[in-house]
């Protein structure tokens, strides 16, 4: 379910920052851009994130309409996460952040020489 438009900030940049502005949400989205992942795969990929923080972020992203959670009726239970259309539409934003980050890292490395 997406956010209620009445609850969103008037500024579109602030809206985007509010939706994806945490370190973990950005990294979760980065990983899900490659395709559907199970909880354990995301946790391993993200490294130092706790199970509680990952669960909380995934729930929040699901509530905001960025991530879809699919539960399969199996034993043991299998749960998979993927980006919704709205979440996937953030690819250009995340790609731009990746490009900017690479450029910044290169400039920083040259400055230290």
Image (cartoon, rainbow, N blue to C red):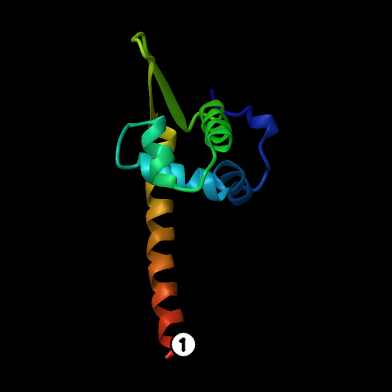
Relative to 10, residue 106 above or below: below
In the image as oriented, which residue stretches furthest toward the left? Answer: 34
Work out whether residue 77 or residue 12 is closer to the camera in this orientation and state it: 77
- Identify the image quadrant of the C terminus: bottom left
In the image: residue 90, left or right of residue 17: left
The image quarter containing residue 18 is top right
Residue in the foreground of this view, choosing between 38 and 107: 38
Horizontal placement of 112 versus 4: left or right?
left
- Give SS at disc 1: helix
- Is residue 90 among what the camera can see? no
Residue 106, horizontal then vertical, whole percent: 39, 77
Q: Residue at x 69, y 30 (%)?
A: 6
Q: How far across and down, in percent of the image, does residue 68 sit?
A: 43, 25
Q: Is residue 35 left or right of residue 77?
A: left
Depth check, front residue: 57 or 8? 57
Category of crowding for the residue at label 1, using alpha-carbon neighbours closer than 10 angstroms: few (below 14), some (14–19), many (at least 20) = few
| Residue labelled with disc 1 | 112
Residue occupying image coordinates x 52% and y 46%: 24
Q: What residue is drawn where x is 39% and y is 73%?
A: 103
């Amino acid at each position: 379910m997406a956010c209620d438009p009445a609850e969103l900030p008037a500024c579109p940049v602030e809206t985007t920052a509010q939706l994806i502005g945490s370190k973990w949400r950005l990294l979760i989205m980065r990983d899900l851009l490659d395709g559907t992942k199970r909880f354990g795969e995301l946790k391993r990929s993200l490294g130092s994130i706790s199970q509680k923080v990952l669960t909380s972020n995934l729930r929040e992203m699901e509530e905001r309409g960025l991530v879809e959670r699919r539960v399969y009726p199996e034993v043991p239970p299998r749960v998979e996460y993927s980006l919704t259309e709205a979440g996937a539409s953030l690819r250009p934003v995340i790609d731009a952040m990746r490009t900017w980050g690479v450029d910044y890292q290169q400039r920083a490395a040259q400055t230290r020489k």
